[in-house]
Image: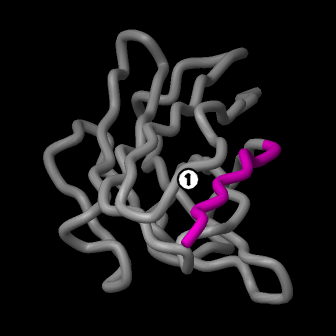
Amino acid sequence: QVQLVESGGGLVQAGGSLRLSCAASGSTVSSSIMGWFRQAPGKEREFVSRISRTGGRTYYADSVKGRFTISRDNAKNLVYLQMNSLKPEDTAVYYCAAALGPGVLEKEYNYWGQGTQVTVSS
């Protein structure tokens, strides 16, 4: 019922910033936990961040704490990931996902976007 489309990726120098957006269609996602994941070449997909249904609670992987900020606008069916102080190791395809359940584990996410490429140069 839900389709997710990421945008905002691109090429940026180390220390720069990008803001990723995730747009939902087909249904509202206000009842869903929303998360961001990423997958670097040759590596497994990993958790980046997630946000509660109301936006009151956020969680981050240790690798991005203090640099990334997740937010949501339920009225617009949008989720954002503000990425600051980017590092080359942040280079990956970033995926938006929605979970109807707890959304703690990757397998609990029911809907996934196609991904958007983020490349951070040295």
Name the residue located 60 percent from the left edge and 65 percent from the top edge.
121
According to the picture, the residue beneath numbered tag 1 turns out to be: 99
Q: Is residue 56 above or below residue 42?
A: above
Does the magenta-highlighted stretch encompass residue 116? yes
- Name the spot of residue 26 as percent of width and height, x first: 72, 15
Q: Is residue 32 above or below residue 66?
A: above
Residue stretch rendered in magenta on the structure: 114-122
Whether residue 68 sits left or right of residue 30 in the image: it is: left
Q: Nearer the viewer, residue 3 or 122?
A: 122
Which quarter of the image is occupied by the N terminus? Answer: top right
Name the residue located 63 percent from the left edge and 18 percent from the top edge.
27
Whether residue 60 sits left or right of residue 93 in the image: it is: left
Name of the residue lying farthest toward the left? 56
Does the magenta-highlighted stretch encompass residue 109? no
Whether residue 18 sits left or right of residue 39 in the image: it is: left
Name the residue located 35 percent from the left edge and 61 percent from the top edge.
15
- Name the spot of residue 74 as percent of width and height, x first: 36, 21
Name of the residue lying farthest toward the top? 75
- Name the spot of residue 48 as percent of width and height, x first: 47, 69
How many discs mark residues in the rendered view? 1
* Three-letter residue code for mark 1: Ala
- Name the spot of residue 76 as percent of width and height, x first: 43, 11
Q: Nearer the viewer, residue 24 or 84?
A: 84
Whether residue 55 sits left or right of residue 31 in the image: it is: left
Which quarter of the image is occupied by the C terminus? Answer: bottom right
SS assignment at label 1:
strand
Q: Nearer the viewer, residue 27 or 113?
A: 113
Instruction: Answer with the quarter of the image where residue 39 lies.
Output: bottom right
Name the residue located 32 percent from the left edge and 41 percent from the top edge.
53
Q: How is the image coloured?
A: one colour
Q: Main secondary structure of the magenta part?
A: strand
